[in-house]
Image (cartoon, rainbow, N blue to C red):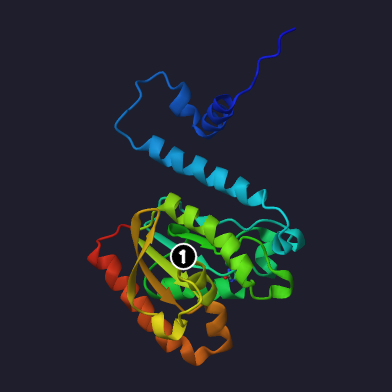
Amino acid sequence: MIKKQINQNDIFRKEFLELVEDKYSFSISPINRTINKPKSLDKQLMLKNLKSKIEQIKDCELKNNATKIVFSDGKYNSPIMIVGEAPGEKEDVIGIPFVGEAGLLLNKMLNAIKLKRENLYITNLVNYRPPNNRKPEPKEIIRYSKYLKEHISIISPKILILMGSVAMEGLLGNKIKISKERGSWKEIIINNKTYQTIITFHPAYLLRLPDQKKYSWEDLKIIKKKIEELQLKI
Ligand code: URA
């Protein structure tokens, strides 16, 4: 018996077909070729591939000690992407970013400028919970920033929000201070594309130092203004 060899194209095609809705692949009505479906499908496939690349990371203390990967939450087609630091205890169990106390505050902050978290795309710099919630080490920040950059390129948001110094460090290095850099728009270039980016305090920091919320509120208003300027539909 001759076994058919499965090559990379077959695997790709299988993954592709698994993602296609039934009505799209089996409908008897003519296919509407003007809809943007393949682009969304590409995004889903690329996200799936990125997730599996992260799952294959070797010799990582974060990964080795975590319960599960915390990849992302929300809409992959959203014009707004939020990047936090790393999963905490609850995120590690549930596998979704920002579902603990800091997440509840994040939801309130977003609601304050009429945004709903489910309409945004949310991830973290690091995808596995650090032991005892310790800060990720510089080598870990570098390791995961490579994946974060790929993640940003796939989502391709109109607005990128970096929450906290670890997310900031992952994209901009450790030479700058969040207290100086927060609250103004920066153009960050990733894979030849420019992203309108704002750095703001992390909700967990605001829980520890509530008097800093006034700065956070300033940043939120700046974000709201940008959404209006860009006429983003969210
Ligand atoms: N803090 C983060 O930065 N991310 C989470 O997902 C939860 C808490």
On the rendering, which quadrant does ligand 1 occupy?
A: bottom right
* Left or right: residue 68 compared with residue 29: right
Q: Is residue 132 left or right of residue 37?
A: right
Q: Position of residue 94 (x, y in %)?
A: 67, 59
Classify 10 Å Cα crowding around label 1: few (below 14), some (14-19), many (20 and above): many
Give the SS element for disc 1: strand
Residue 61 relative to residue 13: left or right:
right
Residue at which label 1 appears: 82
**From the viewer's perspective, is residue 175 above or below residue 21?**
below
Q: Residue at x 75, y 7 (%)?
A: 1
Residue 164 lies, in percent from the top left, at 51, 76
Which residue is drawn at the image coordinates 32% and 76% (left, top)? 222
Asked if residue 225 is positioned above or below residue 27 in the image, the reply reads: below
**Residue 97 visible in this rendered orientation of the protein:** no
Residue in the foreground of this view, choosing between 197 and 67: 197
Three-letter amino acid code at the position of disc 1:
Ile
Q: Residue furthest top?
A: 1
Left or right? Give the position of 34 relative to 107: left
Front residue of 190 and 42: 190
- Where is the C terminus found, in terms of image quarters? bottom left
Extreme bottom residue here? Answer: 211
Residue shown at 59%/56% (left/top)? Answer: 71
In the image, residue 104 sits, relative to residue 190, either above or below, namely below
